[in-house]
Image (tube, helix red, strand yellow):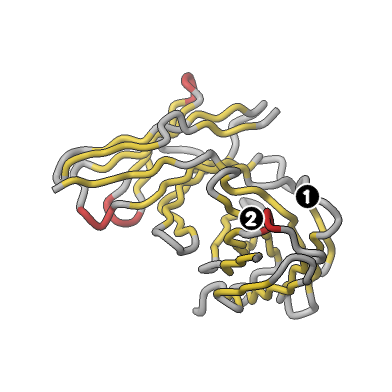
Amino acid sequence: AQSVTQPDIHITVSEGASLELRCNYSYGATPYLFWYVQSPGQGLQLLLKYFSGDTLVQGIKGFEAEFKRSQSSFNLRKPSVHWSDAAEYFCAAYPTSGNEKLTFGTGTRLTIIP
Amino acid sequence: KAGVTQTPRYLIKTRGQQVTLSCSPISGHRSVSWYQQTPGQGLQFLFEYFSETQRNKGNFPGRFSGRQFSNSRSEMNVSTLELGDSALYLCASSVGQKNIQYFGAGTRLSVL
């Protein structure tokens, strides 16, 4: 079955430290991949997306993600986090064959400590 | 360009009632998807509409239904509300084959 896994439920980092959030997918063929962020009580905001080509993609708010086919991973990174980055982050995948649903991981809650 | 608009933002209902939520997609987007988000179950796909037709459906009981109008606006309805229906309901619109979804702020439904 198609699935997206985010192994870390909760991550705490210090302000100014680097961040990496993990995401693994299980699909027959490489899907389109997305990262979303959700602040408390709000909807999801698209951070970045990967379709094909360059495996390092840049997004908004200083985030980037690296696609690794050999590891079926699409990890999100940020060199230096800010207190405003505290939120929940969701990885999602959509099959390239189309006409199916977008599948989300269970999310990773990010806490920033001063 | 205006984003996805969901109304109302908050709703309080009692068990057994029914509720209708509304979603106005981004102009030009013909696909609208609905999700239920709860602390225990996370983000669960309800259904997707494209050009007034339901294209995909999640694993929810028949009490959950939806429709899409010719202007792409969508509504979802939940009948005979249960306490477990308390959740944040999110709507997303998309365009194109890559299905880049843009989300509204959600409707917070509380069932008492």
The spot of residue A112 in percent (x, y) is 23, 46
Query: How many numbered discs sit on the rendered protein?
Result: 2
For residue A43, side relative to residue A62 (left or right): right
Q: Is residue A68 above or below residue A15?
A: above
Q: Which residue in the rendered view is the most extreme toward the top? A: A70
Q: Residues within 10 Å of mark 2 (few under 14, many from 20)?
A: many
- The image quarter containing residue B79 is bottom right
The CA span between labels 2 and 1 is: 10 Å
Q: Give the residue type at disc 2.
A: Gln
At horizontal 36% and vertical 39% (from top left) the residue drawn is: A76
- Tag shown at residue B26: none
- The image quarter containing residue A98 is top right
At horizontal 66% and vertical 39% (from top left) the residue drawn is: A95
Q: Is residue B90 above or below residue A18?
A: below
The spot of residue B86 in percent (x, y) is 63, 59
Is disc 2 in contact with disc 1, using a CB cutoff of under 8 Å? Answer: yes
Residue that numbered label 2 is attached to: B36
> In this orientation, which residue lies closer to the viewer: B40 or B105?
B40
- Report if residue A66 is visible in the image: no
Q: Give the residue type at disc 1.
A: Phe
At horizontal 55% and vertical 30% (from top left) the residue drawn is: A25
Mark 1: secondary structure: loop
What is the chain identity of the residue bearing mark 1? B
At horizontal 71% and vertical 76% (from top left) the residue drawn is: B73
Q: Give the quarter of the figure containing the N terminus of chain A.
A: top right
Q: Residues within 10 Å of mark 1 (few under 14, many from 20)?
A: few
What is the chain identity of the residue bearing mark 2? B
- Report if residue A21 is visible in the image: yes
The answer to which of marks 2 and 1 sits earlier in the sequence is: 2
Residue that numbered label 1 is attached to: B60
Mark 2: secondary structure: strand
